[in-house]
Amino acid sequence: MSIQKILDMAERFVTIAEETVLQSPANIEYKAQRDKLSQFYDIFYRQIRATISEMGSDLDTLKMRNFDPKMWKMLAKIYHSLIEISKEITEDKPYIAAEKLVHYVLDREGAIMLDNLDFLAKHHLKSTNVDFKPSKAFRQPETRSIDNIKKLALHVKKFMTENPLIESPSISRPPSGLPETLKDVPAFFAGQEDVTNPGSPNAKK
């Protein structure tokens, strides 16, 4: 059997094996998760960016209302930390940034700080509100960004818990080109069936 036929058979075997893997339950499950993960990335990215924008507006409002400078700087630091987390969100691995958000917002230290800032900010706005009757056209300012970032972190945590990552099912392809043991075989090598081939150097005269 010629080298080319051996390689052709190996290639057909790989193709059949790959098709079998693609149709396997494990691969179907993996593809379904990738589709869901893509949707998660899209929603997660849009929501964290919207919350960051909202927190920026809250910072402007609190600054105009002369919120305590030290507390304002703490909130501004959180704002910039969220921006950095959002920059790390990637479509193929959104869980990396998602886990950072969960730890940053829901870990004990972060949760206590956010709760305190949320309480102080809301209390400050309420105490500095102008006395008027709210209407559809004009309302008292509110801070919602801290509430929303906590809700987002809880949602993200729940999703990751319910959808743990699945390892990609795969098969190993043989290295391209000739196997190492065959690379040094002279180019004039012929198989048994090639002996009668007039174009072969070893053909019978």
Image (cartoon, helix red, strand yellow):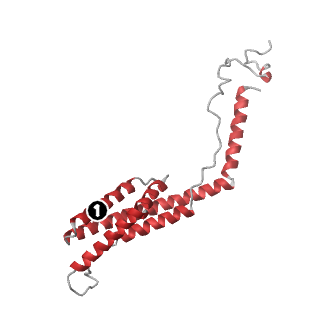
Q: Nearer the viewer, residue 23 or 204?
A: 23
| The C terminus, quarter of image | top right
Residue 104 found in image quarter: bottom left
Q: Nearer the viewer, residue 53 or 42?
A: 53
| The N terminus, quarter of image | top right
How many marks on residues? 1
Residue 26 found in image quarter: bottom right
Q: Residue furthest top?
A: 205
- In the rendered view, tell whether residue 79 sits above or below residue 1: below
- Residue at image position (80%, 14%) is 204
Disc 1 marks which residue? Answer: 74
- Residue at image position (29%, 83%) is 136
Q: Secondary structure at mark 1?
A: helix
| Residue 139 rendering spot, x and y as whole percentages | 26, 81
Q: For this view, does 173 lie left or right of residue 106?
A: right
- In the rendered view, tell whether residue 165 sits above or below residue 118: above
Residue 114 found in image quarter: bottom left
Q: Residue furthest bottom?
A: 133
| Residue 7 rendering spot, x and y as whole percentages | 70, 31
- In the rendered view, tell whether residue 18 sits above or below residue 120: above
Q: Residues within 10 Å of mark 1 (few under 14, many from 20)?
A: few
The amino acid type found where label 1 is placed reads: Met
- Residue at image position (43%, 62%) is 107
| Residue 37 rendering spot, x and y as whole percentages | 52, 58
| Residue 66 rendering spot, x and y as whole percentages | 19, 70
